[in-house]
Amino acid sequence: MAKARILVVDDEKLIRWSLKENLEKEKYEVYTASTGEEALELIHEELPDLILQDIKLPGVSGLEILEEVKKLREESLVIMMTAYGDINTSVKAMKLGAYDFVEKPFVFDKLKLTIAKALETVNLKKEVHVFKSQQKAQFRLDNVVGQSDSMNRVFKMVEKLSRSDATTVLLQGESGTGKDVIAKAIHYQSRRAEAPYMEINCTSLPDTLIESELFGHEKGAFTDARAMKKGLFEITDGGTILLDEIGDMPLSTQSKLLRVIENKAFKRLGGVKDIVVDVRIIAATNKDLKQASAGGSFREDLYYRLKVFPIYLPTLRDRSEDIPLLVRHFVTTFNHEFKKNVRGISPEAQDMMMAYHWPGNVRELKNVIERAIILESEDVILPEHLPLEVVRPEPVTNPHGSSIQLPAEGVSLSEVERELIEQALATSKGNQVHAAKLLRMSRDTLRYRMKKHDLL
């Protein structure tokens, strides 16, 4: 492990010599400087982990050095030394970001303990910095796989959004199209990348808990509120929060979310004080929020407030030219994860994958490749390694069993839609939930189309 680097800055030669001797015995790499100017030069050259410096220096002062360190290298910590007992200057140093201060003459054993604790903090900061760098690299936009026109349009939108200060984004698309991946790309490409990124699935919590999770609560706000709790909006201040499946958010919570968007402030449950936050809200849904707002299950004013910057993610069947790219990407990913050496996919298997309609989109494709690489020992993915539904996809049929084919003379899409809805309702004996499942749409969408065709 590399030695920690410490810079000692003091205009008294004896102090510099004494600290260097003692610190080198502790296996630290030590540099010394007698002036502020010399210290700044060493800081730029050596990037020390810890700076132990006198407040009173000839030329550039200790406080000026502290300010420069904070600009140059945030992970570096500064311990101030003073022989004057100047509390005001020490307090100012702490406000400027000094880790601690010690008074001269100091006991080295006590100083050694302070240095050890400071270096633990430095190491933790380094780990956090590495983690954030890895997150940025992992979720860069150029790691999102796709070369189709529809995905290139998405990429351009994300790039524009990342450079803007827009605080509300609406991601729409079927389940499995990668809304969470795009949300992370937006965050980690933006100026908010160093701030927190949090996400919550609006269907994963009961209505009674979601407000507490989002906005927090005060002690005693409800029966089990034994202590104050900060919500996700407060924790994520300065960063980004993904509200996944926002179409399922309770109406009561929707009204509070609208207030946060408009006023950038909220109150904890049971609280009276406004808490001001700066959070980018990314809302994601596979529902048609316009139809939901027309049906009364989603606030219309919230829908239009979220739709400041809408991004529509295409289905995999609408960008089938990306399937070979995605297959190669997932083969590489799972080869690394499971220590396999699969070279790729056979032409026959690829043709089958290209012909399949992928109702689960990219998520389903990923699962198919993962399963093939885990279970099979061949170095190429063959048709027999694919699930039955991919190898022998069922044709789309009506309840009478005949395949849907476009007549040579053409057809009225509106009439076909009405007929299919009538057949689905007849098959389900009027059960709209069952009929919606047969047509692979939500009940809200079915009701909207029934109303359009005067079937309600």
Image (tube, rainbow, N blue to C red):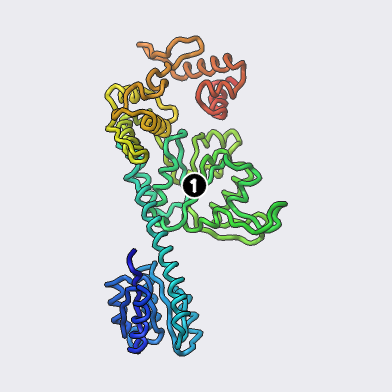
Pointer 1 residue: 242
Q: Which residue occupies the extreme right position in the image? A: 223
Name which residue lies at 34% across and 72% down: 5
Judge whether residue 334 can be spotted in this image: yes
Name which residue lies at 62% across and 57% down: 229
Q: Which residue occupies the extreme front position in the image? A: 25
Name which residue lies at 39% across and 60% down: 129
Judge whether residue 315 can be spotted in this image: no
Q: Using the image, determine if residue 160 lies above or below residue 271.
A: above
Residue 245: x %, y % from top left? 53, 39
Residue 37: x %, y % from top left? 30, 82
Residue 405: x %, y % from top left? 39, 13
Q: Using the image, determine if residue 266 lies above or below residue 298.
A: below
Q: Secondary structure at mark 1?
A: strand
Q: Is residue 346 left or right of residue 207?
A: left
Q: In the picture, which quadrant includes the C terminus?
A: top right
Residue 57: x %, y % from top left? 36, 86
Q: In the picture, which quadrant includes the N terminus?
A: bottom left
- In which quadrant of the rendered view does residue 411 lie? top left
Name which residue lies at 28% across and 31% down: 344
